[in-house]
Image (cartoon, rainbow, N blue to C red):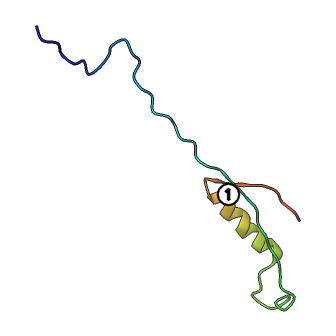
Amino acid sequence: MARTKRKVNPLAPAPVEPTTQQKIYKAGGYVRLSVEDSGKPGADTIEAQKNLVLEYIEAQADYRLRTVHL
């Protein structure tokens, strides 16, 4: 009888695909209010800018807020 090639070795475990971990980036934010814009109608406040930056970082799956300086 002719020798045949085995495609699957029943004794060897199936190869396991290596899992790749998602890269996590350390993020920080910077907010400031220009002296020229201070007090003008429609000028962003520091709190509004801070909230925008924090919401953006939290919305990104691969970002982590590193530190907060007030």
Q: Quadrant of residue 59?
A: bottom right
Say above or below: 57 vs 47. above
Quarter of the picture containing the N terminus is: top left
Q: Quadrant of residue 12?
A: top left
Q: Amino acid at mark 1?
A: Glu
Q: In the depicted view, which residue is nearer to us: 67 or 10?
A: 10
Say above or below: 68 vs 24. below
Q: Residue at x 22, y 19 (%)?
A: 5
Q: Position of residue 14 (x, y in %)?
A: 39, 22
Q: In the depicted view, which residue is nearer to us: 69 or 24?
A: 24
Q: Are there few (<14), some (14-19), or many (20+) residues within 10 Å of tag 1?
A: few
In the image as oriented, which residue stretches furthest toward the left? 1
Q: Quadrant of residue 35?
A: bottom right
In the image as oriented, which residue stretches furthest toward the top? 1
Say above or below: 15 vs 30. above
Secondary structure of the residue carrying numbered label 1: helix
For label 1, the residue is: 58
Q: Residue at x 81, y 91 (%)?
A: 40
Q: How many marks?
A: 1
Q: Position of residue 62 (x, y in %)?
A: 62, 53
Quarter of the picture containing the C terminus is: bottom right
Residue 61 placement, left or right of 47: left
Q: Residue at x 57, y 42 (%)?
A: 21
In the image as oriented, which residue stretches furthest toward the front? 2
Residue 8 placement, left or right of 70: left
Q: Position of residue 23 (x, y in %)?
A: 61, 49
Q: Position of residue 34 (x, y in %)?
A: 83, 85
Q: In the depicted view, which residue is nearer to us: 14 or 48?
A: 14
